[in-house]
């Protein structure tokens, strides 16, 4: 019930934007409605998460496909929390963000934003095929409209085109998926589909492969990620935050929902998911390191983090195939927690990157520098997000990566071939190390040192519309990191719900204890740092302090251009990975510059697309636009068909 | 407090006190082996005392990260040390998966150190930061190959388990595999603590440095605390490697503390021997060096998974 009111408020918020347009007060009413709606939605989801009960409503429908079932179960509740938190914060931020651009009419974008959040809610609440696919398409179209907000830029139009093609390939796979799934049962509700028999066989294998394609495109899994960097870079930053924070997570939701529908997946699927996850994580972070456009860089980090989520999901799937329910719950739970955590810190990073973009007018790292002095609040918030995404304690990223590591290492103790999953552990560590390098680069080059352009030197702190929502998300990151017992038991219970295994009470107790121990470590770490700070304060107070120039190693006329650039910072690490790192470098006597490209989009998708286009051009000769030619085609086709019928033995 | 519960705390305090000795022993060993007398083994204590009374110069462009470097370096390494069974049996704090916390606490210190280096706007320090994150990412990979191998060998998820009593039994049944893992870990220790052949702590040319160049602008007590924290890091990792090679869980508490002190000195000597016998590698060769450590541990891991 609360959820319906929440949804109603979101739609009302969109209506307010449409009705009032640019009149005063529209934005404030919009913000209040979105916040109230989201609070109701979170309350509804929290109720389900706390008592673990599932609620659902059936809406009678005369359309084909049967009645519409809509409801909340623990799996959808976890995603609802992420959608409402990120959606509400980004919507409020968007108001301030769009005000920077006086020429752009902002109200349609705000209205679409509220509707997109509502569509996302419907996707995770749909419990039968027709509302699910309907909401899915609403979400896809909504995303397109939001990407096209700044459609006067060719970059946005190209990104929108690539996105709409990619997302519809995914939709096609989903149609096939549900067609196979509902082949035998006449009932199209998820409940009926879940109870249908899913014996190992071609049909179940087809469903699982189609799920990887259909939901994989949405999630941005390697090698289906190619639409994601251009779309995230071209969209306004609050839209990027929503897309990277929650829209791509709907792909993860879909995979978990399919696992829930078909039961313990076969071994090959678990290994495939683990392998794709590992590959996505490593390549995603490597390619992120090569980027100099802040938003493209963050977009590649989404590929990385979806990879980490899939590593957890893969462990869960493998464990449930090998009949280890507690490890399955741990794997799925780790995937769920990393989903929520990534929604938080990635949207935080996008909101901060948007503030930088609006204040400086550029997303190019090589033009930034020294922003920490100009915008200290944004810098602090960005630093929290960066530390969280790298997985550093005591922030939320550490908690979920710790769970993924635990899943992998625990798999390594199994007597079955499952123990080979432990081989993914070092890959996860490498991802952590590369992410640290990448965020040291962004934070160091954009915020520290001296400004590399006049625009960076003149930036100021953005308005409260931009800082407020980002601050609240940063607080959430810190709270989950310092007090993990708040969330760990919830995601592990949901993990066992996905695995369709009853919750073992000793497992819940053990996980609670583990979560408290992580909290204990966070407290010890903070205490150790606080004591060090006191020691430093005492030591510093006893000596003389003065300020001078940076040590120039004997050179006295230092300029901002002499600083290490983003290109040069990343070069040694990209060099280690050779051609896989996807950069073109330009070396001159006084210049070093690197240009990233996407190995999949620029080396595979675009060339194939171009060759299809070339083939289509050759066919153009057939389309002359002259009636005589078409009459010849008609007569020719008729003759050919008649000839075919005569040869086959004539009409019966 | 019984001797059993007190030994981990005493072991930590012992490590914190002896830490500056380890680089001193390494440097002295190196000097003796190359035919010089060298500085006394307690040189770092003297340096720290001197630095604590010197004035501080902050670079004009620097902000909070630069001032946070010594704080984060010391705090994180002490927090990480709480997880290591320094006394050979149990750590002060342990939980399943604390090996991740150990590695990531050290990563936190590295993140702040690198940001502090970039904070100065100096191209030399940027260069050092870039090299540091490059080699650290590879070391992280190799480190987790070793830790995964030890976890598979002992069926434990915490450092206390990995390097404690269960390991002693596995040494008899899986000697070659564990030997390779231990050797791999020692290779990583040299890379992680910026020792030769990856980095040369005694070099005087900025272009060839990694760790030293990142702290060029630190001075006075700030520099002293950073140097002290890196000696603690070296000692903690040395103690960890020593505990893996030489499990002492069954000895009496006093003997275990003696073993810790002996292990620290011996590891210092070993580091010195390596430094005197091989020159610093060219930077492009360093990834291969780290990969050799990873490969050794990976062989061990494969043998254990067999």
Image (tube, coloured by chain):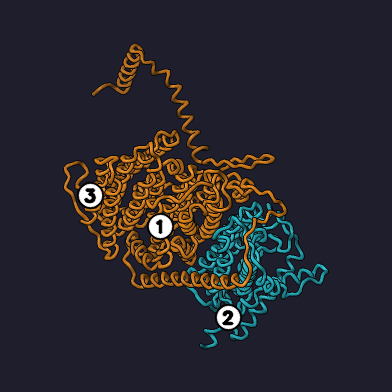
Q: Determine whether, in the image, residue B157 is placed left or right of residue B292.
A: left
Chain drawn cyan, letter? B
User: Label 3 vs label 2: CA separation?
Assistant: 65 Å
Quadrant hosting residue B76: bottom right
- Which chain is indicated by disc 2? B
Kindly indicate which chain is depicted in orange in the rendered structure. A
SS state under label 3? helix
- Residue found at x 62% / y 79%: B14
Q: Residues within 10 Å of mark 1 (few under 14, many from 20)?
A: many
Closer to us: A615 or B301 = A615
Question: Between disc 1 and disc 3, whose residue precedes?
Answer: 3
Taking A323 as reference, is B46 above or below it? below
Q: Which residue is mark 1?
A: A471
Q: Is residue A618 left or right of residue B193?
A: left
Do residues under tags 2 and 1 come within 8 Å of each other at their CB atoms? no
| Residue at 71% in and 74% down | B46
- Reading the image, the residue beneath label 3 is A8
Q: Picture coordinates of residue B71 (x, y %)?
A: 56, 67
Q: If the image is split into quadrants, where does the C terminus of chain A sit?
A: top left
Q: How many marks?
A: 3
Give residue A235's position: percent from left, percent from top: 41, 42
- Return the residue at label 2: B249
Q: Seen in the image, is A183 located left or right of residue B272?
A: left
């Amino acid at each position: 019930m609360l959820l319906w009111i929440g949804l109603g408020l979101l739609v009302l918020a969109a209506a307010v934007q449409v009705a009032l347009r640019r009149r005063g007060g529209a934005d404030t009413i919009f913000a209040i409605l979105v916040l109230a709606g989201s609070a109701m939605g979170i309350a509804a989801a929290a109720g389900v998460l706390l008592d673990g009960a599932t609620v659902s409503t059936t809406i009678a429908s005369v359309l084909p496909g049967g009645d519409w079932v809509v409801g909340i179960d623990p799996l959808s509740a976890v995603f609802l929390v992420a959608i409402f938190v990120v959606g509400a914060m980004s919507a409020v931020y968007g108001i301030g963000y769009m005000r920077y651009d006086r020429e752009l009419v902002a109200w349609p974008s705000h209205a679409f934003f509220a509707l997109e959040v509502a569509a996302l809610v419907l996707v995770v609440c749909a419990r039968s095929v027709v509302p699910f696919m309907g909401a899915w398409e609403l979400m896809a179209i909504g995303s397109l409209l939001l990407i096209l907000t700044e459609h006067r830029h060719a970059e946005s139009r190209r990104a929108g085109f690539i996105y709409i093609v990619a997302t519809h390939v995914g939709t096609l796979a989903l149609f096939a998926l549900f067609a196979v799934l509902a082949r035998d049962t006449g009932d199209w509700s998820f409940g009926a589909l879940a109870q249908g028999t899913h014996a190992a066989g071609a049909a179940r294998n087809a469903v699982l492969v189609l799920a990887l394609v259909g939901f994989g495109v949405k999630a941005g899994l390697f090698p289906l990620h190619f639409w994601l960097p251009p779309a995230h870079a071209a969209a306004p930053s609050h839209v990027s935050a929503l897309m990277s924070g929650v829209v791509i997570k709907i792909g993860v939701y879909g995979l978990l929902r399919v696992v829930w529908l078909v039961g313990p997946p076969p071994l090959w699927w678990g290994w495939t998911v683990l392998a794709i996850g590992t590959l996505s994580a490593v390549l995603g972070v490597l390619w992120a390191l090569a980027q100099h456009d802040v938003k493209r860089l963050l977009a590649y980090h989404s590929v990385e983090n979806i990879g980490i989520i899939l590593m957890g999901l893969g462990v869960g799937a493998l464990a449930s195939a090998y009949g280890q329910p507690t490890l399955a719950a741990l794997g799925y739970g780790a995937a769920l927690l990393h989903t929520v955590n990534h929604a938080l810190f990635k949207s935080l990073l996008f909101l901060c990157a948007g503030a930088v973009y609006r204040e400086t007018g550029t997303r190019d790292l090589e033009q930034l520098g020294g922003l920490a002095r100009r915008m200290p609040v944004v810098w602090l918030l960005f630093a929290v997000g960066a530390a969280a995404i790298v997985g550093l304690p005591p922030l939320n990223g550490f908690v979920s990566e710790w769970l993924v590591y635990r899943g992998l290492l625990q798999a390594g103790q199994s007597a079955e071939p499952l123990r080979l999953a432990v081989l993914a552990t070092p890959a996860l560590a490498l991802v952590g190390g590369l992410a640290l390098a990448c965020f040291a680069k962004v934070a160091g080059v954009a915020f520290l040192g001296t400004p590399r352009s006049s625009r960076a030197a003149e930036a100021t702190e953005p308005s409260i519309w931009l800082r407020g929502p980002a601050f609240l998300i940063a607080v959430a990151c810190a709270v989950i990191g310092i007090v993990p017992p708040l969330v760990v038991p919830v995601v592990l219970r949901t993990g066992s719900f996905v695995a369709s295994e009853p919750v073992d009470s000793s497992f819940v107790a053990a996980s609670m204890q583990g979560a408290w121990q992580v909290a204990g470590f966070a407290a010890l770490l903070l205490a150790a740092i606080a004591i060090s700070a006191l020691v430093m304060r005492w030591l510093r107070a006893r000596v003389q302090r003065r300020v001078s120039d940076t040590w120039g190693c004997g050179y006295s006329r230092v300029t901002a251009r002499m600083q290490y650039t983003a290109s040069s910072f990343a070069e040694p690490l990209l060099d280690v990975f050779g051609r896989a790192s996807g950069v073109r470098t330009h070396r001159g006597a006084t210049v070093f510059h690197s240009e990233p490209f996407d190995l999949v989009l620029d080396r595979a998708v675009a060339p194939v697309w171009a060759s299809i286009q070339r083939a289509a051009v050759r066919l153009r000769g057939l389309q002359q636009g002259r009636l005589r030619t078409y009459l010849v085609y008609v007569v020719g086709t008729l003759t050919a068909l008649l000839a075919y019928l005569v040869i086959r033995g004539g009409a019966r | 407090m019984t001797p059993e519960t007190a030994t981990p705390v005493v072991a930590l305090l012992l490590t914190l006190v002896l830490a500056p000795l380890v680089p001193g022993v390494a440097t002295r060993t190196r000097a003796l082996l190359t035919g010089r007398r060298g500085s006394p083994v307690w040189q770092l204590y003297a340096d720290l005392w001197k630095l604590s009374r010197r004035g501080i110069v902050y670079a004009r462009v620097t902000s909070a990260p630069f001032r946070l470097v010594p704080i984060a370096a010391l705090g994180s390494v002490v927090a990480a040390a709480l997880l290591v069974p320094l006394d050979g049996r149990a750590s002060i704090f342990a939980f399943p998966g604390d090996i991740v916390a150990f590695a990531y606490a050290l990563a936190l210190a590295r993140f702040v150190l690198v940001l502090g280096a970039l904070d100065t706007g100096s191209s030399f320090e940027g260069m050092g930061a870039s090299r540091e994150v490059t080699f650290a990412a590879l070391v992280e990979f190799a480190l987790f190959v070793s830790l995964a191998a030890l976890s598979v060998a002992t069926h434990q998820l915490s450092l206390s388990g990995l390097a404690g009593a269960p390991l002693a039994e596995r040494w008899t049944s899986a000697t070659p595999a564990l030997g390779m893992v231990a050797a791999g870990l020692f290779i990583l220790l040299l890379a992680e603590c910026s020792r030769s052949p990856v980095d040369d702590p005694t070099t005087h040319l900025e272009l060839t440095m990694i760790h030293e160049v990142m702290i060029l602008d630190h001075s006075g007590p700030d520099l002293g605390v950073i140097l002290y924290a890196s000696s603690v890091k070296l000692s903690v990792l040395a103690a960890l490697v020593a505990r893996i090679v030489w499990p002492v869980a069954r000895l009496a508490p006093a003997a275990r503390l003696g073993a810790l002190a002996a292990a620290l000195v011996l590891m210092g000597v070993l580091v010195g021997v390596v430094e005197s016998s091989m020159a610093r590698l060219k930077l492009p060769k360093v990834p291969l060096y780290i990969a050799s450590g990873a490969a050794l541990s990976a062989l061990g891991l494969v043998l254990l998974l067999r």
